Amino acid sequence: MTSIDLDALVVGAGVSGLTTAICLAEAGLRVQIWAAESPERTTSYAAGAMWGPYLVEPVGRVRVW
């Protein structure tokens, strides 16, 4: 894909970059992602998997989630 074929260039493959690229692509734009590291080598890759119900309310509902 050349720069002429692109509508958007997203720099970065963390949560923000990938989310932005997906939203743009779903809107019909031709998107390319440039990143120093592949997504699985970013902090964002693990951060989403480390959510826990710590100090979250209402406790009864959070445990079910």
Image (cartoon, rainbow, N blue to C red):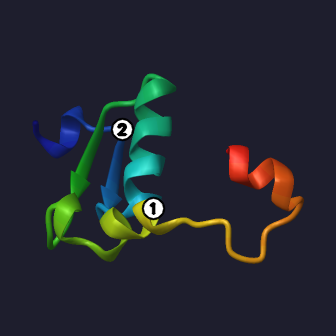
Is residue 24 depicted above or below 32 in this figure? above
Q: Is residue 38 left or right of residue 57?
A: left
- Residue at the spot x=25%, y=52% of the render? 33
Q: Quadrant of residue 55?
A: bottom right
From the image, which quarter does the C terminus lie in? top right
Q: Using the numbered discs, state the Cα–Cα distance from disc 2 to disc 1 in whole angstroms.
A: 28 Å
Q: Residue at x 75, y 54 (%)?
A: 62
Front residue of 54/7: it is 54
* Label drawn at residue 48: 1
Identified by mark 2, the residue type is Asp
At which x and y percent is residue 7?
36, 38
Looking at the rendered structure, the kind of residue marked 1 is: Gly
Q: Is residue 21 left or right of residue 6?
A: right
Answer whether labels 2 and 1 touch (C-beta < 8 Å).
Answer: no
Secondary structure state at the residue bearing disc 1? helix
Name which of mark 2 and mark 1 comes first in the sequence.
2
Q: Within 10 angstroms of label 2, few (less than 14), some, or many (20 or more) residues?
A: few
3 displayed left or right of 23? left
Q: Nearer the viewer, residue 8 or 45?
A: 45
Q: Position of residue 27 (x, y in %)?
A: 51, 26
Of residues 55 and 28, the one drawn nearer to the viewer in this rendering: 55
- Residue marked by disc 2: 7
